[in-house]
Image (spheres, helix red, strand yellow):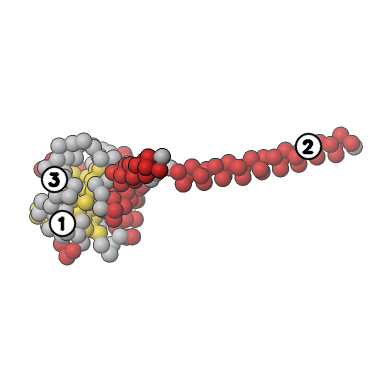
Amino acid sequence: MSFVIASQIVMWIAVLGLGLLCLALARQIGVLHQRLAPAGALALQQRAAVKVGDPAPQLALPTLDGAEVRIGGAPAGRSQLLLFVSPDCPICESLLPAIRSAQGAERNWLDVVLASDGEPQRHRQFVRDKGLGKFPYVLSEPLGRTFGVAKLPFAVLIDETGKLAAAGLVNTREHLESLFIAKERQVASLQDYLEGRSRITASTGDGRG
């Protein structure tokens, strides 16, 4: 009988210890989330005809369904998000839910355009299979070269003034949202913003020293 009581006491002590350990780990995870910087879209070092801050080219391109979409020129004072994708890109497919979400959440100021190049029939099948009929979809190799697209999925954000606000490789929802943050902060990328803050912090610290 005494053995059973002792084992119960030891068990409850172990449970309480595990509970305290879980609380400590949860607190440390919260601290790490506060210290970690948000993941910004990867700005690739590519040769592009248009740089961040430059006016985007004003183009009128045909879509897969025979309509026409205008790139640049700040139509009705709205911003445009160009997402370069491919039917053969698994990461592009995984990013589609985030694109649909952005289309709904940011519809007051943002228009989303999908872009690629290659055989039109393959892309029409891609649109049907993935339910992308609500998005304008253009095929234009020169458009990709203009913005220095070398890897996919690649996103380009043109602001309401018709200037290139941000661009980069977007592998996750966080990468995509970082383009919007970069636009709000008026920086080329979220990395540039964070690096600028680090330099300010470092110089302030040196001055105090």
Q: Where is mark 3, residue-wise?
A: 50
Circle 3 residues within 10 Å: few <14, some 14–19, many ≥20: some
Q: Looking at the image, which residue is at 16% across and 40% down?
A: 148
**Which is more toward the observer, 80 or 34?**
34
Label 2 sits on what residue type? Val
Q: Quadrant of the C terminus?
A: top left
Depth-wise, is mark 3 or mark 2 nearer the camera? 3
Q: Looking at the image, which residue is at 45% across and 43% down?
A: 35
Label 1 sits on what residue type? Gly
Label 3 sits on what residue type? Val
Res 108 visible: yes
Considering the numbered disc 1 on the image, is that residue within a helix, a strand or a loop? loop
Considering the numbered disc 2 on the image, is that residue within a helix, a strand or a loop? helix
Depth-wise, is mark 2 or mark 1 nearer the camera? 1
User: Which comes before the other along the chain, label 3 or label 2?
Assistant: 2
In the image: residue 3, left or right of residue 69? right
Marks 1 and 3 sit apart, C-alpha to C-alpha, by 12 Å
2 and 1 marks in contact (CB < 8 Å): no
**Which is more toward the observer, 62 or 9?**
9
Q: Where is mark 2, residue-wise?
A: 10
Circle 1 residues within 10 Å: few <14, some 14–19, many ≥20: many
- The outermost residue toward the top is 3
- The outermost residue toward the right is 1
User: Which comes before the other along the chain, label 1 or label 3?
Assistant: 3
Q: Quadrant of the N terminus?
A: top right
Marks 3 and 2 sit apart, C-alpha to C-alpha, by 68 Å
Q: Where is mark 1, residue-wise?
A: 162
